[in-house]
Image (spheres, rainbow, N blue to C red):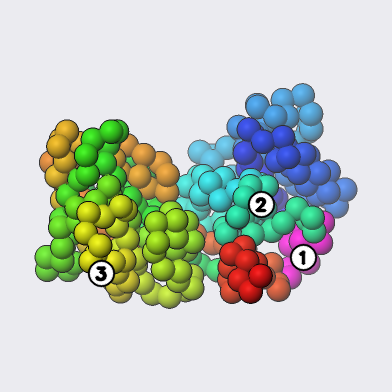
Amino acid sequence: MTIAIFGNTLRSETIREVKHIIEFFQLRGVDIVLSQELRHEAFNREFLSVEDYMVQTGETIDFALSVGGDGTFLTTASLVGHLDIPILGINCGHLGYLAEVQTDNIDAVLDQLLTNNYTIEQRRMLEVTCQQAGKIASPYALNEVAVLKSGLSSMITVDVSLNGEFLHNYKADGLLIATPTGSTAYNLSVGGPLLEPHVSAIILTPVATHSLNIRPLVISDDSKIDIKISSRNGNYLLSVDGRSQVLNQEILLHIERSQRTTKLVRIDGQTFMHSIKEKLHWGK
């Protein structure tokens, strides 16, 4: 078995956990590779026998461990998700809906990984394209695609069509197009609904909409979404799982369910319902 470890190098607690995980697996004869960022920013002089993981070489690994928060998980997914590699998220951040495993029982969880006491969930993704080739730097989203006002400009107008039929022109700070997995992320913070991860749906949630009559909308995930943006400064911000770029308002977007999925490792005993009840303090 070979395991690649990715982590947030800006947090000291993450570095401590990564060091513990390396030592845990080394004692059990498991091959470990480290992301280049971890190697060069955190362990340049330690664990010299542990090699760098080079995504470009297509090296075969069995699992990827994402040590940090949900942002680290999304970064890990963007690097190895297309290689069909299952990802286990270990939480050193705050809420941690994707990085569910808590560090206080990390050894037991790693033992379960080694003894095959886990399940693998296929999480749906979105793909965003445009008519202008090469304009979308990062087109695949596990959580959400967001179109937002750029800088300090006034609100934008987002014209949305579903399957060729005009839906609405949202006047707002932006619009989120979220997956069920992303329902607990940016979507939740702006008042969107929570969805169980395997629901076949997409969520449209406005950000600071000008009209109180406009509410989040849940649509089928086989919908084809076309978007045109108008803004006072002529630009808008496109954010795909937090990876952002500024685009000219003349660039039209098309969003639909991707053929790609992300494989998420869920340790036996963990469920989505248990996770949200615990993290949102339901009943307390």
Whether residue 22 is visible, yes or no, is: no
Q: Which residue is mark 3?
A: 223
- Residue type at mark 2? Asn
Q: Is residue 50 left or right of residue 10?
A: right
Asked if labels 3 and 1 touch by Cβ distance under 8 angstroms, the answer is: no
Q: Secondary structure at mark 1?
A: helix
| Residue 165 x %, y % | 12, 68
Above or below, 178 against 21 in this view is below
Q: Quadrant of residue 159?
A: bottom left
Q: Secondary structure at mark 2?
A: strand
Magenta region: which residues? Answer: 107-120
Q: CA distance from mark 2 to mark 1?
A: 17 Å
Whether residue 234 is visible, yes or no, is: yes
Q: Nearer the viewer, mark 3 or mark 2?
A: 2
- Residue type at mark 3? Ser
Q: Is residue 201 left or right of residue 15?
A: left
Q: Residue at position x 40%, y 61% from top? A: 191
Q: Nearer the viewer, mark 1 or mark 3?
A: 3
Asked if labels 1 and 2 touch by Cβ distance under 8 angstroms, the answer is: no
Q: CA distance from mark 3 to mark 2?
A: 33 Å
Q: Is residue 102 left or right of residue 141?
A: right
Neighbor class of circle 3 (other Cα within 10 Å; few <14, some 14-19, many 20+) is some
| Residue 278 x %, y % | 65, 67
Q: Nearer the viewer, mark 2 or mark 1?
A: 2
Q: Which residue is mark 1?
A: 112
Q: Quadrant of the N terminus?
A: bottom right
Neighbor class of circle 1 (other Cα within 10 Å; few <14, some 14-19, many 20+) is some
Q: Secondary structure at mark 3?
A: loop
Q: Is 174 contained in the magenta span?
A: no
Q: Which residue is mark 2?
A: 91
Q: Earlier in the sequence, mark 3 or mark 2?
A: 2
- Residue type at mark 1? Gln
